[in-house]
Image (cartoon, coloured by chain):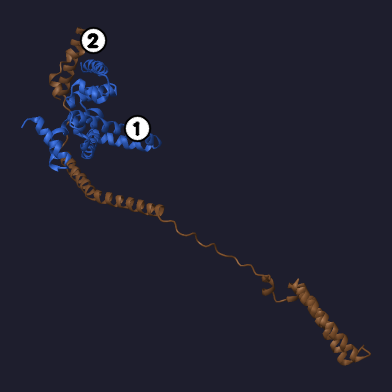
Chain colours: A blue, B brown
């Protein structure tokens, strides 16, 4: 059985509510989706939450997958989960403003704790990715983690392929410069 | 994903940029992808994956419970709609019944105050006149008996009788009116 028909079988199982099929789906995609979340957010804690949220959402949404490109569909959901997170974060930031001092102290404590944690070390790439605008960063990361073609990415985002390629071109050029 | 393998990035860029720029863009993309491979993002821990699988199982259980009850809820909803439609249609197409008799109101010929009141004199002027005349007759009768103010007792009795007859006829005349 080739990889494509194996994936089709897993998806069919998921659509029937089979826990084992979902387990296989987690094994197949968790690494790539986690990578995307991590590179977009720069935080393991956020990535952990978002990955859980993504797969729980898939339980509800898998029935709406109509059998085109699963990777394209999955990364569209993944991207939506991340953007929902950004919206929540923006709303929270408004609340935070009112409790600024109290929360700033808590944040300082958390950062001190974080710096002691070896697993939370930031790498050079993560630092440089922050210099790109959000849309360009997302396009580059989607291209890398979803393993989709430019045409598929353009369709997924509902943008003309020329726009996507132009943004990616500018982004990769800048990232190359930053990385040296 | 299959499309990605067949994708020629340089050719794609050539549709939008010049050949030199397209070559450079393709090279930039290849280099950046190499950088991303050289700097892999951390992977999700096994513990996290197990937690996710556990959460999925719980969600599936909830979904199955909902699926189990959903037909029952739907059946109840459909039954409620059918009953409602039935009741409404029965009301709409019911045979028209005979019009109900309007409640009759009976008016008393004699004012209720006459029956209810304890003072007859206040209620009817005719009766008060009659009552006064009877009193007058009684007084006259007593005077005759005591022989006061009247010279001839026989004439007095006759006068009294005539007066009584007048009162009687006058009373019945008034009643007839």
Q: Do labels 2 and 1 touch, CB within 8 Å?
A: no
Q: Is residue B27 visible?
A: no
Kindly identify which chain the residue marked by label 2 belongs to.
Answer: B
B136 vs B96, nearest the viewer: B96
Q: Position of residue A143 (x, y in %)?
A: 20, 23
Is label 2 on the same chain as label 1? no
Rounded to the nearest whole Å, what is the CA distance between mark 2 and mark 1?
37 Å
The extreme left residue here reads: A1
Q: Is residue B59 visible?
A: yes
Q: Position of residue A83 (x, y in %)?
A: 29, 31
Q: Quadrant of the C terminus of chain B?
A: bottom right
Q: To which residue does mark 1 refer? A: A90
Camera-side mark, 2 or 1: 2
Per the image, label 1 sits on a secondary structure element best described as helix
Taking the spot 55% from the left edge, 64% from the top edge, the residue there is B103
Q: Quadrant of the N terminus of chain B?
A: top left
- Residue A46, located in which quarter of the rendered image? top left
Q: Which mark is residue B17?
A: 2
B121 vs A23, nearest the viewer: B121
B92 vs A93, nearest the viewer: B92
Q: Which mark is residue A33?
A: none
Q: How many marks?
A: 2
Per the image, label 2 sits on a secondary structure element best described as loop
Q: Residues within 10 Å of mark 2 (few under 14, many from 20)?
A: some
Q: Position of residue B105 (x, y in %)?
A: 59, 65
């Amino acid at each position: 059985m080739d990889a494509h028909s194996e994936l089709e079988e897993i998806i069919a199982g998921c659509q029937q509510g089979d826990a084992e099929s979902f387990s296989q789906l987690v094994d197949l995609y968790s690494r790539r989706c986690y990578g995307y979340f991590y590179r977009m957010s720069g935080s393991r804690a956020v990535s952990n939450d978002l990955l859980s949220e993504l797969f729980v959402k898939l339980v509800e949404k898998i029935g709406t997958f109509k059998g085109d490109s699963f990777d394209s569909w999955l990364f569209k959901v993944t991207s939506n989960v991340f953007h929902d997170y950004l919206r929540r974060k923006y709303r929270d930031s408004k609340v935070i403003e009112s409790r600024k001092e109290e929360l700033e102290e808590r944040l300082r404590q958390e950062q001190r704790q974080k710096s002691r944690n070896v697993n939370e070390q930031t790498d050079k790439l993560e630092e440089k990715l922050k210099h790109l605008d959000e849309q360009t960063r997302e396009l580059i990361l989607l291209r890398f983690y979803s393993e989709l073609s430019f045409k598929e990415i353009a369709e997924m985002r509902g943008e003309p392929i020329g726009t996507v390629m132009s943004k990616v071109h500018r982004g990769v050029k800048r990232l190359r410069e930053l990385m040296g | 994903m299959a499309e990605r393998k067949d994708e020629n990035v340089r050719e794609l860029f050539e549709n939008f940029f010049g050949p030199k720029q397209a070559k450079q863009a393709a090279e930039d993309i290849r280099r950046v992808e190499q950088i991303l491979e050289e700097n892999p993002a951390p992977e999700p821990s096994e513990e996290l994956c197990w937690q996710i699988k556990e959460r999925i199982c719980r969600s599936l259980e909830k979904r199955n419970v909902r699926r189990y009850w959903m037909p029952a809820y739907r059946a109840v909803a459909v039954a409620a709609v059918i009953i409602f439609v039935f009741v409404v249609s029965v009301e709409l197409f019911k045979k028209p019944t005979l019009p109900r008799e309007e409640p009759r109101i009976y008016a008393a010929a004699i004012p209720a105050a006459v029956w209810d009141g304890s003072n007859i004199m206040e209620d009817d002027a005719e009766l008060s006149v009659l009552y006064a005349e009877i009193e007058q007759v009684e007084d006259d009768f007593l005077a005759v008996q005591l022989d006061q103010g009247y010279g001839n007792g026989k004439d007095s009795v006759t006068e009294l009788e005539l007066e009584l007859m007048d009162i009687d006829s006058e009373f019945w005349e008034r009643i007839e009116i």
